[in-house]
Image (cartoon, helix red, strand yellow):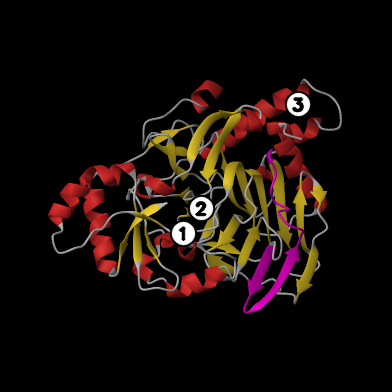
Amino acid sequence: MLSTLFTPSPRGTRLISPEDCVQAMGRRRTLRASRRSGPNASSNTFLPTQLANLLLWTRGDLGITLNGSNVSAWADQSGNGNHLVQGTALNQPLYVASDAAYGGKPSLTWDGSTSSMHTTGTVTLGPGTYIFAVKNTTASSYFAVFQNDSTDYLFASTGLSSFVSRSAVSCTANLGAAWGVNASPRTIVRTFDGTVAGHTIRANGVDLGATTAGSPPGTGTTAQTLFVGSNHTPALFLTGSFAECIVYGRALSVPELQQVEAYIRTRYGYY
Amino acid sequence: MNAFIFVAATDAQSTQSDCDTRLGYPKPGVDIGGGVHAPPAQSSTVHEAPVLKHRTLTQWAFLSTPNVQAILPTVKADLPAVTIGTATALDATWNDATPADSVVVAAALPAAQDITSGA
């Protein structure tokens, strides 16, 4: 069954349903968990689909469409059809089938000059949580941004590290210079619950203590195209790679964040 | 990044379209891995290189690739009324220096040139 899951398939032929896939992965992790002991055993059975309000979930070993060695589509596994795509060859990230930085798991490489992916349609986000398994070596670059920069973004350098705006009311979470730069992959998380104080940035399970400012934008929503690894121009490109992108349409609680972070840590083992 | 600079959006678009046709776009992709895949209409590659609008000047850039360079003589023959100069390096004025600058770019981009629209 599992070998079937990861066998290249001809276009248009679905070997298994999304539900089968998720259940199979869950069974595999359950089996692994049953062979282990200790406090992290339960995290091995977790998948992002188990928490409510999942908007988008892409993972390097699932839903890849290649144009040569580049990626033209990275399909959303949440069931919402928010696929990440790039129809211009020059702007497509490179597929790496086995990336040692992610424990030998697949990743997608952004080149820092043209690579960018975006959702096929709009994603509605009010309060929300971005979670990335990402390596970024460029200070002036975006992890993610909605089409209009005046709504939402997560920026790797100093200043407005994270920005949220709804109906012209905005708030920010700010960190030091090049906070988002690291030679190795990290789990980067941004949460926003509608309040100024509820705007946090985490890395590898630790709240970075961002300085928040502005006015509370509230819990209104915006529906716009989501870009990954650049802004919407596109410009300010990320140099590095993504192995997984997860977006929820609500601010996860800390215990929930820890579940997702444990899942990523177990899967990739980079910290 | 090298690019061909145009002073008319239509010339940049015509050049892009002619290159894409000659290079065989749109091209379907190959699905790998498990899980759900994007439908072919969304996962195909439709362009070789993008057209960008300068954030302040009335200029458009069609980015150059080795594939574009290889077919350029035939493209020029196809488009005799379009002046396609030598590819030159885009300077920093073509790119956003700060997040705030991106708002200016968004306002300046004609809809047809906004390659981020998914069209």
Q: Are marks 2 and 1 on the same chain?
A: yes
Residue tagged 2: A82
1 or 3: mark nearer the eye: 1
Q: Type of residue at label 3?
A: Ala
Number of numbered discs visible in the structure rendering: 3
Residue B56 placement: quadrant:
bottom left
Q: Report helix, strand or loop for mark 1.
A: loop
Q: Residue at x 86, y 32 (%)?
A: A39
Chain of the residue displaying label 1 = A
Of mark 1 and mark 3, the one earlier in the sequence is 3
Q: Which mark is residue A33?
A: 3
Of mark 3 and mark 2, the one earlier in the sequence is 3
| Left or right of A229 on screen, residue A194 | right
| Left or right of A43 on screen, residue A108 | left
| Left or right of B9 on screen, residue A108 | right
Query: Do the numbered discs 2 and 1 sit on residues whose CB atoms are within 8 Å?
Result: yes
Chain of the residue displaying label 3 = A
Q: CA distance from mark 3 to mark 2?
A: 31 Å
Give the magenta-colored segment's residue range: A162-185
3 or 2: mark nearer the eye: 2
Q: Type of residue at label 2?
A: Asn
Q: Which mark is residue A121?
A: 1
Q: Residues within 10 Å of mark 3 (few under 14, many from 20)?
A: some
Q: Residue B27: x and y, percent?
A: 30, 42
